[in-house]
Image: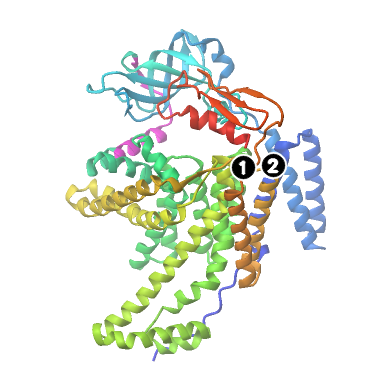
Amino acid sequence: MKVYRNTPRRVLPAASHQPMLWAALSFGAGILMGSYFWRPATWWISATAFFAGAAFYFFRRRRPLAYGLGLAALVFAGALAIQMREPEESGVESIAQFADGAEVRVTGHVTREGEIQTTSGGDVRQVLDLETEEIDNAPVVAGVRVSLRAQDSNSPHTLFRYGQSIRLPAKLYFPHNYRNPGGFDFCAYMADHGIAVSGSAKMESVQVLPGFSGSRIERWRTRIHRSVIEKIHMLWPAREAGLIDAMVIGEDAFLERATRTDFQKSGTYHVLVVSGMNVGILAFSLLWLLRRLRVNDMAASGLTIFLCLAYAFLTDVGAPIWRATLMLVLYLGARAFYRHGSILNALGAAAFALLVLDPKALLSASFQLTFLCVLLIASAATPLLERLSQPYLRGLRNFGAISYDWVLPPKVAQFRLELRMLAKPLSRLLGKTTSMILLPGGARLVLSGFELLFVSALMQIGLALPMAYYFHRVTSLGLVANLLVIPLTDILMPAAILALGLGYLSSTLAAAPAWVASVAVRMIASSVQWFGGLRAADMRLATPTLLTVLCGLTALALAMVLARHGSRLVAIAGIGLLAASAFYIILVPVRPDIRKGALEFTAIDVGQGDSLLVISPTGRTLLIDAGGLPFWGHPDFDIGENVVAPYLWSRG
C-alpha cells in the first residue's frame, strides 16, 4: 500500500517577502506626487539622499525603521524621476514651417508599416510612420504619420514595407487637440510615439527609392509578422482571420468597427487585443505540454520563457505584453532556482523596472489596468481561493487511494468520502472504473467553474472604478460573457498557434487544429455579438467625483489586505465592501455640474461644424448638433463618442 506523507498547508507569503511590490508602490506614489506638486530638483535629490542615508544607518540597528526610510527614499526618487524626464524628441521645431496644409515633397524611410485596408467607402488605405530626411530639398529629421489613399480598390496596390526609402507629395498638419475638459490628449499621444505631424497623400504618387534604412532585426521581425498574417488568411476565411489576427498576433487592421463595439459593450475587449492573458495562456499550454513530455522544471521554465519572449517580440503590440512577459520571466525564474515564486514580488519587480525606464507610464490607463488586474488576482482572488476551493481541488487527487484521506483536513476527507458513497450506486450503471473517473472529474469541473466565476466577478467589481473614470462605461453582462469567452480563448490560442506552426509544413496537417480554432472563434464572435446587442450590456457613466475615487481606492486596498491577512469571514467582508463601492459607482448618479439660476451656452470644440450645449436656469439641458467628420477624416473616429460625450461626462 502506498503511504502518503502529510502535506504541509500552503502558507501565503508575508509582506516582507514582497519587497519589490512595496518598492514599486513607493516609487509610483512619488511619481504621482511629482506630477502634481512641482519642486526644484535639488529638493527631491536632497530628500532622497537624506532618507537613503538614514536607512543605511539604521539597517543593522532597527530593520523595520530602515525599511520604512528606504521606501520613503524611493518616494522622493519617483518624484525626481518624473520631473527630470525629458519630452520625446519628435522634430516639431524643424518641421513646423511645412505643416500648414500646403503640398510639400517629403523624402524619408518607413519606420512602421501598416496593413492595406479597404474603407467603408471603397477606398484603399495604408497608414505609415516615416522618419523624414528631406522636405522640399531641405534637410529635416522628424516623425510623420502619413495616410496613403487610393480610390480603385480592385487594382493591386503596392505595400510599403519597413526600411524602404520613399518620396511622395504630401499635405502635412499638426496633430489637433479638441479643447474640451475630459478630452483625449491626441498631441501627447503622437509625441509619445515620436510623431511630430500627420499627413495625407495619394498612394499612386509614392516613389520607392533604392536603399534600406533601419534596424535589420526589426526588418526581420516585420517580415515574420507579415508572413504569419498571410498564413492566417490562407488557413481561415476573411472574417475569422481578422479576429484571429487580433487575438493571436495583435494585428487589428482587419477588424470591423461594429465588431470592436460589440467586444467593448460585452466587457470582453481584453480578449480582442493581445495582452497579458495571451502570454499566460501560452505559458500555461507550454508548461503543461513540456511536463507531459517529462521535461524537467528548469528546462521547461527556460524554454517557456524563451518562447514567450519570442512571442512578445513578434507581436510588438507595445508595453502591455512586455509587462506581462517580464512578470512571467521573473516568476518562472524564481521557481527555476527553487525559491518561492511570489507573483506579487514578480509583479512589483516588473512594475518597478518599467517605471524606472519610463516614469510617465504610471499615468497611463493601460499600465494601471494591467497592474490592477494582476494585483487583484494575486492579492485577493488567490488567497481566498486557497481557503475556499483549492483544498477540495487538491483533495480530488489520488481519488481511489483511501490512505490519502489520512493526511487531508477533516472537511476535505469527508468530501472525498461522500463522493465515494455517490460512486457506489453510479457504478451499477456505468461500472466502477467509469464512476471513479466521472465523479471526481465532474467535481473538478464544478470547482474550476466556481473559481472562474469568482475571479471574473472580482475583476468586474475591482475594475468598476477605473473603467468609469477612464472610459465612462461599465459592462453589466461582462461577468457572464467572460465565463463563455475566456474558456473559448483558452482553446483558441493553442489551437491557432499549432495550426500556424503546422501550416508552414503542410496544409493537411494544419487542418484539424485550424478547424478547432475556427469553431472557437465563431463561438466567441456569436457570443460577443449577442451580448453586445443587448441594451442592458453597456451602461455609460459620468466621471466619478474625487470623494468617490478616494472611497473606491480605499475599499480596493482594504479588500486586498483583508483577503490576505484576515479570517475567511473578514476576507469575504472586504470583498463585500469592494462590491458595495462598485455598485455605488454604477447605480448612484453623479450630481451634474450646473449653475442654478443661470442660462448657460457652451460651444463645444468639435473641429469642424457646431455643437452647442444649452442649460436653462431650471437645469434642463439641450444639445444642438454634434459636429461632423474631423478634417483629417479617420473612418473609425466618432466625433460624438470621442469628443462631445467626454465633455458631457466631465460635467456629470
In this rendered view, identify the residue nearer to me: 515 or 547: 547
Q: Looking at the picture, how far across and down is residue 153, in whole percent?
A: 26, 23
Which residue appears farthest toward the left when viewing the image? 508
**Left or right of 154, for residue 370:** right
Residue wearing tag 2: 32
In this rendered view, identify the residue nearer to me: 519 or 545: 545
Q: Looking at the picture, how far across and down is residue 464, in whole percent?
A: 56, 50
Task: Find residue 343 and report its image quarter.
Answer: bottom right
Residue wearing tag 1: 362
Question: Secondary structure under badge 2?
Answer: helix
In this rendered view, identify the residue nearer to me: 634 or 32: 634
Q: Which residues lie in the magenta part?
A: 206-229
255 relative to 457, above or below: above
Residue 193 can be seen, yes or no: no
Picture colour scheme: rainbow
Residue 322 can be seen, yes or no: yes
Q: CA distance from mark 1 to mark 2?
A: 8 Å
Is 204 magenta? The answer is: no
Q: Earlier in the sequence, mark 1 or mark 2?
A: 2
- Which amino acid type is marked by label 2? Leu
181 relative to 411, above or below: above
